Amino acid sequence: MAEETLDDRLSDLPDSLLLQILSLLPTEEAFTTCILSKRWQYLWTSLDSFIFSPRYFLGRNKGFRSFVDYVLSHSTASKITKFQIHCSALHNYKSQISQWLTFAVKKNVRHVVLYSPPPYIMSQSFFTCSSLITLHLAESSLVSNIVIAWKSLKTIKLEEMVLVDTEIKNLLSGCPALETIVFNNVGGFRRLEINSIKVKSLKLEGYWVDDGGESDHSFEICVPYLQHLELSQDFHDFKCSLVDASSVVNAKITFDITCIKDLHNDYDQYSDSDEEDEDSCSDYHQAFKTLIQDYLQKLSRATELTFGTLFTQVLCILQFKGVPIPELECKHLVLELHLEKFSLYGAAGLLRASPLVETVNLEIENLPFDDSRCYFEREYLVKGDSIDLQSYNSSSVFPNLKNVEIVISSGMCMKEHLNWEYIRKLFKLSNFLLKNAVVLEKFVIVSKRRRCEICGIKCVSRFLSQLASKLRSSAEFVIAYQELVDVSSVVKAKDNPCQDSDDEEDSCSDYYQDSDDEEDCSSDYYYHDSDDDEDNFDQDSDDDEDNTD
C-alpha cells in the first residue's frame, strides 16, 4: 500500500468548481488550502467571495487586519460576488475599513454583509455602489444626511439597529429597485410608509425597544402595494397598526407581546397588587384585542394567512364577549401554536372564519415557557379549552377543506413533561377538523425528530401515532402518521392493504419497541375506520401515558 499512488480526485476538478467550493468557506479556511500542494498554492487568489471573521484570530485585531489586507492585495478576481466582514472590534481603524469597502465597490461587489460598521467608516462610494444587489447591515446605523444611491439593490436586511422615520425615507428614496425589506429587531421609527410598487415583501422580526422615555408605544405601517407581510417575534409593548395593507395576499402575523406587569419599567407599579386583582392590566390588553380585530379586517382578502398563539388567545376572549370575527377569504391557513399556550376555542374560531380554506397546517411547538407570565383574562382561556367544539357543528362545516397537516417539533421530552390536558386540546382540534371537513382527502401527522435527545426514545412519535390511531376517519380518506417523510400522493382507504385495526396494530408493532433498529423501520403508518372518539381518548389517557413510558 505504501508504494501505491492514490489519485487526488479533488485536485482534478476544474478551477471554476474548486473556487465555487472554496467560496462557501470562511476565507481564513480557504486560504489554508495553499499548503496542500502546488495545485492549490495560488488558487485562493482567484476567489470572488470573501467571508472575513476575527473569531479565527482570537481577539488579535492586528493579525486580522493584516490578513484582510494581504488577501485583498493578492486578489486577482475581476469582480466580487460576495463580501462579508465582521468589524465589531475595529472601530478605531476607520481608514482601513473604508479601504476594504472601497476595494469591494471597485470590483463591482453584488452582495455585502457588514457587522457593526458605523456609517462614518463607510465611504461615500459605498453608499452609491450601483452594482449592489443585496445588503445585510447589523448593529449599525444610517444617518439621514447620507446620500444613498443603491440603484440595483433588491433586498436589504437591517438587524439590531435603531432607525428614525427620516432615515427610512432616505433609504427608500435611494433604492428604486428594492423588492424585499427585512427588519430584524429594528426600532425607533413610528411610521413605515412604502409607496413603491416594486417592494413586494416586508418582514418585521421583532421591534427594538428604544423609546427614550416616550409615552407613545405605537407605530404604523402603510404598505398599499405590498404582497407579502410578516410580523413576528417579540414586539414588547409596542402596538403595530396597519394603516393600509390592501394588496397583501400572503401574511404571517405571529408576533408576541409582553404584559405590562412583566416590563421592567412598570413592574413596581403592579408588583404590590393583590393576587385577586386580575384586571390590573385589562386596559393594556384591550388595546391589543382591538388591534387584532383590525388585523383580521385588513387582511380578510389575503389568500394565505399564518397566525400565532397570541391570536388564538385574543380570539377566544372576543368570541366569549360576542364580538364578531370577520370572515376570511384565505385558502391556505397556517396556525403556529405552542402546545401548552394556544387557545382551543380561539383556534377553532379562526378555522370557522375561513369557509374557503382548502389547506390547513398546524405547526405545534412544545418548548418550555415562563409560567409566571400573565395570562390575561385567564378565566376565558380556561373556559375556552374545555368547550365542546361540536356544539356548533352546523355552522362550522368546511366545504372546501382537502388537506390537513399537523407537524410537531418537540423542544421538551414528552415522556417527562407530557400533560394530557394539553394533548387533549390537540386531539379536540384535530377531531373538529375531521368531523366538519366534507371533502377531506388527506390528514397527515408529522414528527420532525426521530429520537428525543433527552430520553433517547421516540416519545413524540409514539404520542403522534397514538393520536392518529384515535382520530375518527371515514372510508373516503385516510389518516397518515409520518416521521420525516412527505406524502407525495393521496392514499385512498380502499387502496390501503390494511383491512382492519388488528392488522394496523401488527403492521407497526416494531415501532413500539425500544430497540436499536427503530431507525430502520417503516415511517409511514395509516389508520382508518377507528371507533375511538373524544370520550374514549379521555378514558384511555392514563393507559397511553403508560404505553409511552
Image: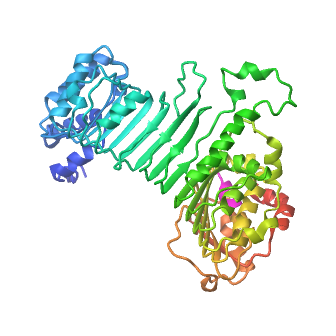
* Image position of 108 (left or right of 384): left
Q: Quarter of the image holding residue 499? A: bottom right
- The main secondary structure of the magenta stretch is helix
Q: Quadrant of residue 481?
A: bottom right
Kindly identify the residue that appears in the image at 22 percent across and 32 percent down. 128
Task: Using the image, determine if residue 364 lies above or below residue 482.
Answer: above
Q: Residue furthest top?
A: 92
Query: How far from the left and from the top, in percent, is residue 250?
Result: 49, 55
> Which residue occupies the foreground of this view, 364 or 47?
364
As drawn, is 94 to the left or to the right of 70? right
* Residue 124 visible in the current orientation: yes
Figure check: 391 above or below 287: below
Residue in the foreground of this view, choosing between 435 and 512:
435
Residue range in magenta is 456-464
Residue 277 located within the stretch drawn in magenta? no
245 sits to left or right of 133: right
